[in-house]
Image (cartoon, rainbow, N blue to C red):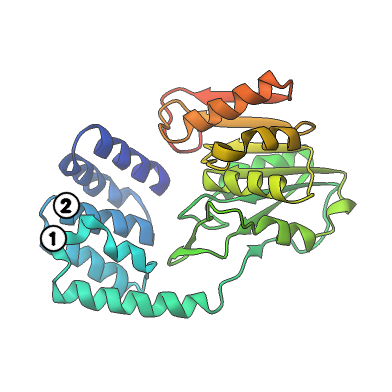
Amino acid sequence: MNEEQLLDKTLEILSESSADKAYAHLLSNKDSLEEYSSQLYNFLYCLGAVVGAKDEALAWMHEAVIDKDYWYRPEVFEDDDLNSIRDETLFLKCKEMSNKRYYEALKTASTLCTWEEVQSARLALILHGNQQNMYSDKGYWRHLEKYGYQVEYIQSQTIDSHMLYRWEDDAKTQLDSVIKQLPWDVYDSHILCGFSAGCNEILKTLLNTDIKCEKIILQSPWIPVIDNNLDELIKVLSKTEIEIICGENDDDCLPYAKRLAEEADRRGINCKLQIIPKLGHSYPI
């Protein structure tokens, strides 16, 4: 079990049962991980605070912020889950230290891409999800190399926390600026691939720019862009092959996946939807 799977299962338990059981599950399985990200620590101190384990919650926050120099966007410390420890001296110290690091990081934040040179006639660009980075998904997309694709990864400039990033839901895009810096037309074939909110960034870019690609692959698509723009988006995608993969237990994203697939099918667009049994908001094995 990797960290993504552990946190996904923890959220599932939280939604179906209780915070106590979710916290117990996280505590019981965290030692199987080699290291903990800032996101995992966020789960630990938030759940600890919710279930009344105040000392443990503060200890997790100390370990994350003071011992490991992690930091978070300021909104994290406003989470209602932390109300039980909000007035504690250690909480206030960690909040201050974290905020200082966050604002320092903002000064140099930029959109990144692993591309360095043309290595193939086919190009696949991969976009991570929220609270991930461009290294998070490498193991899941590397198989595209078997089909002759040069696989490159893009990282958002929007900071979530230490080494983790997010995509905004507004109309602004970052993907188009990356593509415009690449020799896009040199490649014979292009695929844009995304996980979760990375899928929304792809659709926003295709909707709001003149960038075209032959295929998009949307994994666990969090795509609120279709709420108000589905008809226009479908027109833009009329000549694009669409592949959508989503878990049957992904309560937030499956409705989006089905809605996009159904409309694409109705309009005669080449779209394939795979719904993976027993899978939540994650990649299939």
Q: Earlier in the sequence, mark 1 or mark 2?
A: 2
Report the front residue among 59 and 198: 198
Q: Please give the name of the residue rendered at 56% of the width and 77% of the height, measured from the top-left corner.
A: 108
Q: Is there CB contact under 8 Å for labels 1 and 2?
A: yes
Find residue 94 and report its horizontal and vertical position in percent.
26, 74
Residue 242 horizontal side relative to residue 44, left or right = right
Q: What residue type is labelled 1?
A: Ser
- Residue 59 seen in render: yes
Q: Does residue 35 appear in this view?
A: no
Q: Is mark 1 on a helix, strand or loop?
A: helix
| Rendering quarter of residue 239 | top right
- Which residue type does callout 2 highlight? Val
Query: Counting other residues with Cα less than 10 Å from the Cα at mark 1, is it few (<14), some (14-19), or many (20 or more)?
Result: some
Q: Is residue 68 left or right of residue 204?
A: left
In the image, is residue 1 above or below residue 36? above
Task: Using the image, tell me which numbered label, if any, was put on residue 18.
Answer: none
Residue in the image at 75% along x and 57% along y: 179
x, y (%) of residue 5? 39, 41
Mark 1 lies on residue: 84
Label 2 secondary element: helix
Task: List the residue tagged with mark 2.
Answer: 50
What is the CA distance from the residue labelled 1 to the residue labelled 2?
7 Å
